[in-house]
Image (cartoon, helix red, strand yellow):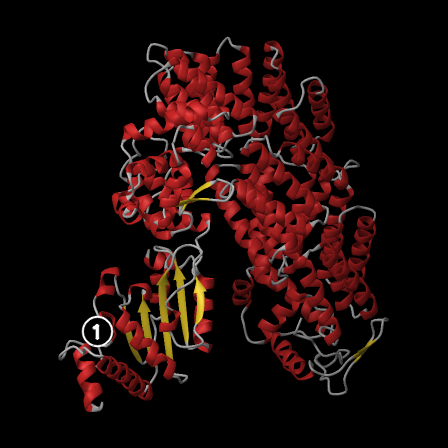
Amino acid sequence: MGARSLTLRPELLDAARAELRSRPGVLLHGPAGIGKSTLVAALTANATGTVLRCSPADEDARLPFAGLVDLFSRVPDSRLDALAPEPRAALRAALLRGAEPEDGRGLLAVRLAVLEVLRALAAAGPLLLVVDGLQALDDPTAEALAFALRRLDGPDVRTVASERVADGEQPQRLRSCPPGTVELPVPPLTDAEVARLVRTGVDADLPPAVLRAIQDTAAGNPWYALELARAALLGPPPSDSGRALRIPRRLRAPLLDRARALPEPVRHTLLVASAADRPTLTLLRAAGLPDPAAHLAEAERLGVATADTDGTVRFRHPLMRAAVHADAPESGRRQAHTLLARVVTEPVERARHLAYARPHEDEETARTLMSAAESARRDGALAAAGELAGLAARRTPGDRPADRAERLLVAAEFACDAGQSAEAGEAAATVLAKSDSARRRVRARLVLLRNAGQALEGTRALIEDGLRDADGDPEAEAWLHHWAAVRGLLCGELDEAARRARRAARQAAVAGDTETRIGALATLARVRSLAGEPVDADAALEEALALAGGAGGGPQSWRLIRMRAILALDADRVTEAHQQTAELLTSIEEFAGVEELLATLVSLTRIQVRAGLCREALRTAARCAHTMAESAPALYAAALAATAGGTAEEARHLAGQAVRASEADGDRLFLLRALAVLGQAELLGGDGRGAAAAVEALRRVRELGTAMCAADPPVLHWYADLAEALVVLGETDEAEVVLREARDRVSRDTPGGAVAALERAQGLLEAGAGRAKEGAERLRAAVDRLRRLPLPVDLSRTLIALGTVERRSRRRSAARTVLGEALETATRIGAAPLAARARDELARLESGSGEAGPELTPAEARIAELVGGGATNREVAAELFISVKTVEGTLSRVYRKIGVRSRTALAHAMAVAVIASGAAVDSGDDGQAKAPEQAVAVAPAGRTQSRRALDIRR
């Protein structure tokens, strides 16, 4: 475990440190392997002064004063020499430096000596006593410590101890710690923490099924998890044992030391209970066990297992159950499964027991397993369905290769539905390599394509090879052309995607495959929408909906509903989009595979953000992460939700992860979205460095979108963000070019939200170029447009922009009204980053920041400050991540506004500004500021001199 597991509990370590600063001691307690020793070591690693420590083992408990010998091993004889003769002799004897005390008087002398030595050490400096394993401390040492610590006090005396206790139990050795010691239970790790610990601890990625089994069996115990992981790397568990893990003997020994001493009938009862999915006394009696209640009572006495009042059998720990099962001979395990297969009535569980009871090829068993797999699939138990179909394939006799391949292929499809990509890929690859059926090889390739997720860029050869196998089979050709269309959509090859989608729809119509035809038309609708052709998109979607009307529910119908919702979202019909997607999620979440569920959750997150349901968006994004944590879509959804309701730092981090995941997948569609969210996240801070990072990300969006011929409404929002970031940097010329390109894309079908975004960016550009009045007019027009739309996040953002421009124009009353509305709206909808921006602008307004000087934009003020401080144009450009040309253009505007002609005069003006920046300024709504009397004129001789102080605090 060591330091690796420690990093998983920083909060607990911080809490322990805080308690140790204010309390005389800390006692960490929990079961074996939970990580107590690691925490004790970290807690005491940098201790100053004298540290006395011992770590007794269980066998030490029988040795009198063994713990005291360890504790005092670094105490020099000179400390003992200062004691009175009798205590000195008694202590030396206890430390094996003399004869052992034998009577009560001698033990009392030992305790007094320990107290006096500890007092002397504490008087010389800080003293820390460390006992890692109180449960194994010998009684004489425990009593001596208890005696001394009750009488020893002072701010420089501390104790850190640990005690091993069973799950749910309280420590028994608290009296060996000083009064006032705080007890801190060490909790189990979460599944996510176990996954990280295993990944770093064994320096390898285990198959998902194995990792899940480790998480379930270890139940948060880091020692158990690492031991199970190391055993898993040595090879698979015994075949068809009914357990996914190998239980190493060094784990079994301490767990089963007592269980192995139980009578054979009791051990047999425990074995049958360990094999059952849900063991109860009723089930054990039905299986023919004579007196399971009495057997469980014996097992409970030894702390192995127990029966609850309702008859449910529970093992002390999941690993105990696994160890009991693993410790039995193979014949015993088969017998246990045979007994259970006879009495269990649930089809899936019965089929599983039957498979483990008959670990050989048998067609009847294989058929039973396939029937149970289909039943599990209908019930939504996707992982169980895949497991049972895989078992059916292994039980299929060798003289039925076609049946075996078909069952293995079904297992691959079910596993893929369950998100078990490793299992699905292995089974599909086996079919692809060994099957002599072209159609089955095509289906195997479809599983591999689904397994690729968003990473379809490198699958062109897989699709083309499949088309060669599918030649002459219209249905199989339709499947593969549809996947080629999906690949083209994700890789930004929109013309190719449209062509393939149309061909897939035609082939599916010939084959009578309505489901694939619907899917192809839905993909065509998405491609046409992304290409900025809403009429064609609606036509394809309507055709698909018409077909789906008679096709019933299912994944294709779900995709159509999502597609219709996204088109409604792009058209600013946010309420409609939200209702459709929320209803879809409610109806499918118990039945859909992980891909469909994730796609629906991502769509809902997008809609909730635009609808201003920021808190709900965070919760939905968290579900995305739970469904498929490391995928680009899930990371994108989490980043998007964070921009709306989280923090700028969190949004930047998640968006960066989404970008890297999309790049790794070759998924240009989600790369486009992830980069756009990264740009938005960087803009949240409103500072130049963030704006520079936003420009870098959003320029990539612009380039990627152009290469993909993307023209749907979100592109216009991203153009507006790029223009805004450029304005913050002072790159107004490039911002104008970007907005001109965006305006060329606007038509009468462009939704109002996209138009308002461009108006907001144009207003900021006008203000940034020194035309504050025109900028405010543009921004007011955008606000008026947004008030008519259900887009509160966009409205809040635009109100903040307008309020900022009004503040810099010294229209205090107007700025206060607008910013107040922005703050109220952002707070109400949970848009935390926007609420913070609004509060910041209001604070600037109330403090008078930015009101006593010419109308410099933030970019102009920063450049003026740097140049006034002596920086060259090239140095300014490097500092602000802008071009030298932009610095020169901005300086020209600054010279005109301030009324200077040279860098020297600007430096003088900046010096005056620093002196005058704290002076009170009275400003009315007419925008005319009354300059302070001490303001220094900065215009050169021969020109009308300005008496306004330049504010450099903006």
Q: Secondary structure at mark 1?
A: helix
Q: Is residue 564 left or right of residue 399?
A: right
Q: Is residue 721 above or below residue 532?
A: below
> How far from the left and from the top, in percent, is residue 781?
82, 52
State how many labels appear: 1
> How far from the left and from the top, in percent, is residue 291?
39, 35
Q: What quarter of the picture does the C terminus occupy?
A: bottom right
> How far from the left and from the top, in percent, is residue 719?
66, 46
Q: What quarter of the picture does the N terminus occupy?
A: bottom left
> How far from the left and from the top, in percent, is residue 783?
80, 53
Amino acid at pointer 1:
Val
Q: What residue sits right under mark 1 in the picture?
A: 69
Q: Is residue 119 left or right of residue 786?
A: left
Query: Residue visible at 70% across and 80% down?
Result: 938
Q: Is residue 664 above or below residue 456?
A: below
Residue 46 visible at all: yes
